[in-house]
């Protein structure tokens, strides 16, 4: 077997060099006032706080003078500023909630009273009848950024559309592009390190990212892209083209239908970037230890009357050592977003191509001998030198909405994904035999493909019945995918040791990947949100009828070897009550999740071949949300019950009577304190039990890979008097957890500390953002969590991250 990856990497080395040179060349162009000199915009990051402080800090960063009357602005606050602005636009954005606007003189800038609004007759405009304005978002509107800039004020809730956090009967978080940039979070897993309800169940250096939410597995295949399942990139989902990473805790069958793998712990949705109202041309470079370099170009602009047409391009390239020792990883991303904003019609097209290659290693999973858990090796230990893998993702999606009137609108979306993989991308396991760390290993070479078509169409109606306001939606979805897979090429068994790893044997390339199956997930949903008592009470009722069809095909003849066609109805109910003030929201929900039912493959069973209906997981949740304008909390309690298949030994039959029950408490905190300190994180307690198992010995056991306690707490501090300098720190804690279903093995708790800093400086007439982060500062080696029954992953070692970005 020949391995062509090294020569390919050598061929791409000039591209890495070219991107590094391009960054330096762009700075020279910016300094000489060349082609980009017409843009006077610069990049700013000023937190909300006292108006005088914000204005003075902005003036210093912009290199201009501003005259302030301290008595006039005393007690006034500014909403802050984050993004690319010209000098005047930046001042006026800081002043938008005040009675002042910016004026310019020969000596600099000064505050002046905001001009009174002219009467309608003088403006030659028709006077409008009085209307009542509510805080309800448009269905496809991107919620605003919350104080501190790290999270948004709401998220997309599938068929319910864009919903503010305080109006949502669920626990949700939406992490912003600003957070992604400041933390140098290059993948979705890195973003979700901020969420105490989420844990990364694979490990740094592996080619796939999988997660656990509320103690239930969410695979990378279950990520949604702009509301549609089946279109997000397989492997590592990159963040360069992502505006928001939205996380809904708990099942979401009503909201978006059944996900491809039937995850029930939560929903992760990626919102793509769109062109903003201000032109953007940003070039960034980064470096990660041990020696990986990257470059990212982000360009966007709007055209036409009132900026109706928008285009946003994101291109990124990374190459070099990362993950475990001597492992190399290469990634190439190109993404474009086009959109049209009309009076009634809105259109958007998203297309991306993502290539990812790993070479000379991967992170791995370990199982322990019956004698018990042993210590992990040093961080970065590479058990799989010589293995490689390749992933290719190409996708395109179109979304449209049309407002027939204020009372009726329609929307539709369709997208396709082409995914191809090859190499040693799974089975990276070490079954340890003794306390010395010896194990017997094997590798296998894989090839496969998935071709996906995802679509949704719906109608939204807004009407009133008496004093009750309704927002009703009817939606139909379709998710179809064809799967190709070659029979893996297995290597011979080889001996090695986790503390002194040898060179593994490599399985042979299995050749072409024939089609081995297809599936179709189709559904119809109806939901209505009723608003009572002036929007103080919001009641959401809905249900989704889901059809699940799958076929398995013979890889040679193409004959159907098994067929699955089942249906299920998943209702949901959500309630939000604001009894005293809009700043306090009480909520509760009942919602179900859906997973494909099991099939009996035990040929000795009496009901061999039986296929069960889809498993319906059921959640009950209640909580309180408290928003103080710049600082917010969410406290929730939940219980999720999920069925599973088990064997009745007395009758020698299988049934769907298995029961897992996870219940817990979650606390989330976000926002900023005093205008200088931004906080993000929280803590969770989860009690996961197998309440009905296949044997009395397993009934009542704790679910493996479900720590009772998890906590994340991050702080980001703008240093007073040090213009543009911010320091940040994050603590991640995960409690002890069982490794296997029988609860005979347990790994200990672990704590990780991350530190960082960023500095915004003026250089050559441009604003330069410098960022530095260190993850796992102590370089602690630990078993991080459990991926499969009996297997654990090792935590990542210390990682240094440096980046520089400039707006041209």
Image: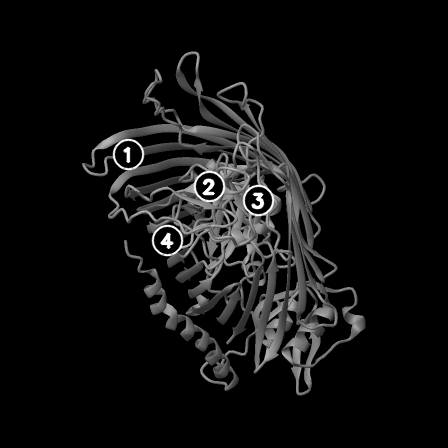
**Who comes first in sequence, dot 1 or dot 4?**
4
**Who comes first in sequence, dot 3 or dot 2?**
2
- Residue at (46%, 61%) from the top-left corner? 274
Rendered location of residue 461, percent (x, y):
46, 42
Find disc 3 in the rendering and name its residue: 783
Find disc 2 in the rendering and name its residue: 439
Mark pair 3, 2: CA separation: 17 Å
Mark pair 4, 3: CA separation: 24 Å
Q: Residues within 10 Å of mark 1 (few under 14, many from 20)?
A: some
Whether residue 97 is visible to the viewer of this picture, yes or no, is yes
**Res. 168 image quadrant:** top right
Q: Are marks 1 and 4 in contact (CB under 8 Å)?
A: no
Find disc 1 in the rendering and name its residue: 552
Vertical arrangement, residue 152 with respect to residue 118, above or below: above
Q: Which mark is residue 142?
A: none
Rendered location of residue 425, percent (x, y):
39, 48
- Residue at (76%, 69%) from the top-left corner? 73
Q: Secondary structure at mark 2?
A: strand
Number of numbered tags placed on the structure image: 4
Mark pair 1, 4: CA separation: 26 Å
Q: Which mark is residue 389?
A: 4
Mark pair 1, 3: CA separation: 37 Å
Q: Given this view, does label 2 or label 1 mark the residue nearer the observer?
A: 2
Rendered location of residue 169, percent (x, y):
58, 39
**Who comes first in sequence, dot 4 or dot 3?**
4
Q: Given this view, does label 1 or label 3 mark the residue nearer the observer?
A: 3
**Who comes first in sequence, dot 1 or dot 3?**
1
């Amino acid at each position: 077997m020949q391995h062509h990856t090294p020569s390919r990497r050598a061929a791409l080395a000039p591209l890495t060099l070219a991107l590094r040179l391009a960054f330096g060349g762009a700075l020279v162009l910016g300094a000489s006032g060349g082609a980009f000199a017409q843009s006077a915009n610069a990049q700013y990051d000023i937190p909300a706080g006292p108006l005088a402080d914000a204005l003075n800090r902005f003036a210093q960063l912009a290199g201009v003078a501003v005259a302030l009357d301290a008595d006039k602005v005393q007690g006034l606050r500014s909403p802050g500023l984050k993004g690319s602005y010209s000098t005047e636009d930046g001042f006026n954005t800081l002043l938008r909630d005040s009675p002042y606007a910016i004026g310019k003189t020969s000596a600099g800038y000064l505050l002046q009273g905001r001009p009174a609004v002219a009467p309608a007759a003088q403006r030659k405009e028709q006077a409008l009848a009085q209307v009542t304005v509510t805080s309800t978002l448009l269905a496809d509107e991107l919620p605003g950024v919350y104080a501190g800039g790290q999270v948004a004020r709401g998220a997309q809730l599938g068929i319910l559309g864009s919903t503010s956090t305080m109006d949502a009967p669920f626990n949700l978080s939406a992490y912003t592009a600003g957070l992604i940039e400041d933390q140098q979070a290059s993948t979705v897993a890195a973003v979700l390190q901020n969420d105490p309800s989420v844990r990364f169940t694979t490990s740094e250096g592996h080619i796939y990212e999988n997660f656990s939410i509320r103690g239930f597995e969410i695979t990378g295949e279950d990520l949604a892209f702009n509301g549609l399942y089946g279109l997000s990139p397989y492997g590592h989902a990159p963040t360069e083209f992502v505006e928001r990473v939205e996380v809904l805790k708990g099942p979401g069958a009503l909201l978006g239908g059944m996900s491809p793998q039937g995850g029930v712990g939560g929903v992760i949705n990626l919102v793509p970037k769109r062109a903003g109202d201000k032109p953007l041309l940003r070039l960034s470079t980064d470096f990660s230890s041990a020696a990986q370099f990257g470059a990212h170009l982000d360009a966007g602009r709007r055209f036409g009357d009132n900026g109706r047409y928008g285009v946003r391009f994101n291109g990124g390239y990374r190459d070099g050592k990362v993950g475990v020792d001597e492992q190399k990883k290469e990634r190439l991303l190109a993404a474009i977003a086009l959109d049209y904003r009309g009076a009634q019609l809105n259109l958007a097209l998203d297309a991306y191509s993502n290539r990812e290659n790993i070479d000379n290693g991967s992170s791995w999973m370990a199982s322990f001998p019956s004698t018990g858990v042993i210590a992990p090796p040093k961080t970065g230990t590479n058990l799989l030198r010589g293995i490689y893998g390749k992933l290719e993702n190409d996708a395109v999606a179109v979304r449209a909405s049309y407002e027939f009137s204020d009372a009726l609108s329609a929307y539709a979306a369709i997208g396709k994904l082409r995914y191809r993989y090859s190499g040693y991308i799974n089975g990276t396991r070490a079954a340890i035999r003794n306390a010395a760390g010896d194990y017997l290993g094997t590798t296998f070479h894989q090839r496969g493909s998935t071709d996906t078509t995802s679509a949704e169409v719906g109608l939204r109606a807004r009407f009133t019945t008496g004093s009750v306001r309704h927002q009703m939606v009817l939606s139909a979805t379709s998710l179809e995918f064809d799967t190709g897979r070659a029979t893996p090429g297995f290597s011979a068994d080889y001996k090695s040791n986790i503390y002194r790893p040898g060179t593994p044997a490599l399985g042979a390339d299995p050749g072409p990947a024939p089609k081995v199956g297809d599936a179709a997930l189709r559904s119809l949903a109806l939901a209505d949100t009723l608003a009572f008592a002036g929007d103080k009470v919001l009641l959401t009722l809905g249900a989704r009828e889901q059809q699940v069809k799958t076929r398995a095909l013979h890889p040679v003849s193409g004959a159907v070897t098994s067929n699955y066609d089942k249906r299920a109805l998943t209702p949901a109910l959500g309630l939000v009550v604001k009894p005293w003030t809009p700043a306090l929201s009480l909520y509760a929900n009942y919602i179900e999740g859906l997973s494909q039912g099991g099939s009996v493959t035990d040929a000795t069973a009496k009901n061999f071949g039986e296929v069960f209906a889809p498993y319906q997981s059921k959640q009950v949740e209640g909580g309180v949300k408290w928003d103080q304008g710049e600082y917010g909390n969410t406290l929730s309690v939940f219980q999720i019950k999920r069925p599973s298949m088990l064997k009745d030994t007395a009758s020698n039959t299988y049934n769907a009577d298995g029961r897992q029950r996870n219940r817990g408490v979650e606390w989330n905190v976000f926002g900023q304190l005093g205008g200088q300190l931004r906080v993000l994180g929280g803590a969770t307690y989860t009690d996961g039990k197998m309440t009905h198992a296949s044997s009395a010995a397993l009934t009542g056991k704790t679910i493996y890979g479900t720590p009772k306690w998890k906590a994340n707490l991050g702080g980001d501090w703008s240093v007073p008097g040090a213009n543009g300098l911010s320091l940040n720190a994050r603590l991640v804690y995960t409690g002890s957890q069982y490794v296997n279903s029988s609860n005979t093995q347990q790994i200990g708790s672990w704590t990780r500390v991350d530190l960082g800093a960023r500095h915004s400086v003026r250089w050559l007439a441009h604003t330069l953002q410098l960022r530095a982060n260190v993850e796992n500062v102590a370089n602690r080696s630990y078993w991080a969590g459990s991926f499969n029954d009996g297997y654990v992953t090792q935590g990542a070692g210390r990682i240094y991250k440096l980046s520089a970005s400039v707006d041209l």
